[in-house]
Amino acid sequence: MTTRNFLRPLLPALVWAALVVPGVASSQAFPDKPVTLVVGFPPGGALDTIGRTLADEMSKSLGQKVIVDNKPGAGGNIAVNAVLNAPNDGHTLLLAAINLATTPALSGVRYDPKTALTMVSQISSVPVFMLASGKGRLNAPADVIQASKATAGGLKMGSGGIGTSGHLAIELLTRSQKIPSLHVPYKGGAAANLSVISGEVDVIFDLGSGALKSFLDAGSIKPLAVMQETRSKALPDVKSAKELGLPPDTYIRSWQGIAVKGGTPQAIIDRLYKAVVAAADTPAFRARAWQLASDVVTSKSPDEFQQFHDAELARWTAVIKAAGIKAQ
């Protein structure tokens, strides 16, 4: 038998080995250089802070520096595109947030929101609060519902902007309870907080934050409910929407997590998952999350986070289209 004839039956196996073995080797060596965490929000904000804290803790378990790269703008699309334009080798991560599930319906995207990114793990859940002036007459969601029905055009309800979690919370409440309202969008939660303190609006819906805690401590803002099934660990004295008789279709939680470009090898995703979960379980990360009024929540697996993301995408696409919300 000639050498050529001898090797012919082995060719398929040799080709398979040539294609697969380098990928396995690269997965085992991961990470072999610094990792970049792309954050689609400006430096200094709550999401930037939570991302930097996670990056610091991940650096310890990965054995490579995790560097934060802020790319704000376009509803998070600039950050997403930066990740999609990078190699799918796990060295470029995205700080995923609820905007991944809302932006496709709000303003449209040039990628497939279901497949372009692969979710790794959730890291935190941020409660959305119904808030009123500390000196006002509103003390519970029932007061808000009753007052909205009794007011021509409904109560003035503020949020941190078009398409934000606060805005979506307003849409959920008004549609569920069939009440009128006038949505007043502001440029961020800080401006919305000041508006309800001054009486410019009757109620606002906003994320938990360190600034909110200070307003609550001062008594200038009154929490009426946290818009979810259970109380927030960060602000446990505030009753949940469920406790106060509101149905599940009014519940909302903002969230953050880590995602990578689609097509990243599963072995690398699994390595990142372990590093993310370990980082989120450190005292430093938990303390930072508590300061930001966020709850630490990690996924049981990358697949669980993927399913969560897909469910959020479907939910918010339906809500945004039904309400006719458009980005400005």
Image (tube, rainbow, N blue to C red):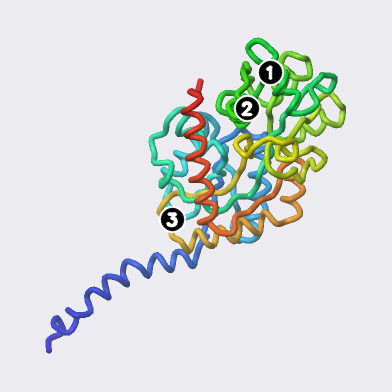
Q: Tell me if mark 1 has few (under 14), some (14-19) or many (20+) residues whose alpha carbon lies within 10 angstroms of its own.
A: many
Quadrant in the picture for residue 162: top right
* Quarter of the figure with the N terminus: bottom left
Vertically, is 227 above or below 6?
A: above
Dot 2 or dot 3: first in sequence order is 2
State left or right for residue 53 relative to residue 101.
right
The residue positioned farthest toward the bottom in the image shown: 1
Q: CA distance from mark 1 to mark 3?
A: 49 Å
**Residue that carries the numbered disc 2 in the rendered image:** 177
State left or right for residue 291 relative to residue 260.
right
State left or right for residue 163 relative to residue 89.
right
Dot 2 or dot 1: first in sequence order is 1
Q: Secondary structure at mark 2?
A: helix
Q: Amino acid at mark 2?
A: Gln
Vertically, is 233 above or below 25?
A: above
**Residue that carries the numbered disc 1 in the rendered image:** 148
Vertically, is 195 above or below 95?
A: above
In this view of the protein, which residue sits in the foreground, 257 or 245? 245
Q: CA distance from mark 2 to mark 3?
A: 44 Å
Q: Amino acid at mark 1?
A: Ser
Quadrant in the picture for residue 228: top right
Residue drawn at point x = 74 percent, y = 36 percent: 244
Percent across and percent down for residue 64 are 59, 57
Percent across and percent down for residue 36 are 54, 48
Q: Amino acid at mark 3?
A: Thr
Quadrant in the picture for residue 68: top right
- Answer yes or no: do the residues labelled 2 and 1 have beta carbons within 8 Å? yes
State left or right for residue 29 relative to residue 49.
left
Labels 1, 3: front one: 1
**Residue that carries the numbered disc 3 in the rendered image:** 264
